[in-house]
Image (tube, grey):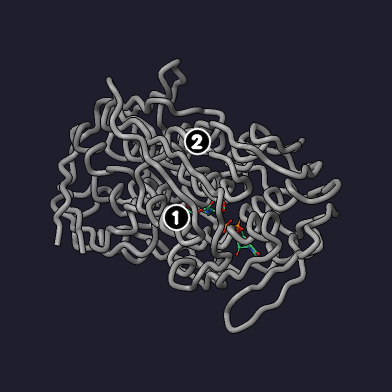
Amino acid sequence: MDRIRITGGQKLHGTIPISGAKNATLPLMIASLLTDQILILDNVPRLADVALLQRILGNHGVDIMVNGKRPGETQYDGQTLHISAANIIDTTAPYEFVSRMRASFWVIAPLVARMGEAKVSMPGGCAIGTRPVDLLIMALTALGAEIDIDRGYVIARATNGLKGGEIRFPKVTVGGTHTALMAASLARGTTVIENAACEPEIADVADCLNKMGASIHGAGTARIVVEGVPKLSGARHRVLPDRIETGTYAMAVAMTGGDLLLENARADLLQAAIDVMRAAGAEITETNAGLRVARNGAGIAPVEVTTSPFPGFPTDLQAQLMALMTCAKGTSHITETIFENRFMHVQELVRLGARIQLDGERATIEGVETLKGAPVMATDLRASVSLVIAALAAEGETMVNRVYHLDRGFERLEDKLSACGATIERISG
Ligand code: EPZ
């Protein structure tokens, strides 16, 4: 298993290109199942989760062509995928795939909408929580799907197609909203989704679906109306920049000190996180090339943050913020309200000398002068990068184990950081 070795103490200076958003790319690839024509996606990040989803879609009979290098393309330019689901030959998504990436469960929506049937393994839990799919099933049922659960599989049927309906989510769910949008796009009649997720990735996917001929209004707000259409066509769509990658590197330079240009980053995608980082002492300015983030001289100020659905502070940046707060000049509090077990990074940060107390969903972080490098273990995608952030400022050497978690969501992280002065290298094996 690959490991990453970091020697802390270097400030970060330079430019980091921000890749296409993982959490838009995955549903966009799944949306290709809604049409028999070609969907072209630009700015697709080179991530393990994207490669896995290509295999999963291939299992359904989907053909995916990836563009080779193009004149003038740099190593960080996103990939272009040409995806054709002309012939879906299998409507089953097996456990060995879905258990490795829960977003693949979302294939249930386009499969039952277009093919009238789907048999998809329950995703199972993961490090950050039980991750149930009851609300995704509720959405499909509201659109007329007949659901059976048999030996760990969800079987959805709609032999006469789906029909529009009312979906009111009792809590905000990104996956539930993606599922409802994709299913409703091909349902007969009108669907109204209440208490929909407002994450930018939802609006990005809706924008692509509308390019494919769907009729979706209000995506990005809590109330979305979808007029179903009989067929969707191909389209070409560019994946929006990754707001979580943006926030992650912004916190890294806030931690080490220095000055970074986050190329192609968009402030409107992570305003709450920008407000928190400014309160913590980072200088963040919007430029036409992206976001400039610096911290010179002033220390890190403590903050009080509670995670919440967009436009609130994102849960996917909670671990990274906690790493930053370990060296604040004072005591901070971070409350995690989205997942029930998203503090797996705490014990690892404590190994580096952090002072963190947990009380249920609330963490109290007492800032320390310096962290000290040590071997640590990554447990999930965002926890692993919080260890990298801490290690970049720790005295001495840190070895981060199990970095396959990192590769799921961060494209060429060690290259991007070492290009800006970090002493970081991947050790294969
Ligand atoms: C998406 O996961 C993201 N994944 C997650 O990012 C992100 O943390 C999460 O949204 C919240 O923003 C992708 O987009 C691929 P939810 P999702 O449904 O859709 C509960 C990362 O690091 N819930 O919004 O699975 C659920 O347990 C990942 O990139 C139900 O109770 O999250 C959670 O407590 C991690 N029943 C809350 O809702 C359901 O049927 C929000 O989950 C569905 C969800």
Residue located beneath label 1 in the image: 53
Can residue 116 be spotted in the picture? yes
Q: Residue at x 22, y 31 (%)?
A: 420
Q: Residue at x 80, y 61 (%)?
A: 160
Which kind of residue does numbered mark 2 sit on? Answer: Ile
Q: Is residue 427 left or right of residue 351?
A: left
Q: CA distance from mark 2 to mark 1?
A: 15 Å
Q: Position of residue 371 (x, y in %)?
A: 24, 52
Foreground residue, 88 or 14? Answer: 88
Label located before the other in sequence (2 or 1): 2
Q: Is residue 181 left or right of residue 144?
A: left
Which kind of residue does numbered mark 1 sit on? Answer: Leu
Can residue 359 be spotted in the picture? no
Vertical relation: 377 (above or below) 245: below
Vertical relation: 382 (above or below) 13: below
Vertical relation: 178 (above or below) 153: above
Q: Position of residue 170 (x, y in %)?
A: 76, 60
Foreground residue, 102 or 71? Answer: 71
| Residue 40 disc label | 2
Ligand 1 quadrant? bottom right
| Quarter of the figure that contains the N terminus | bottom left
Q: Image quarter for residue 3? A: bottom left
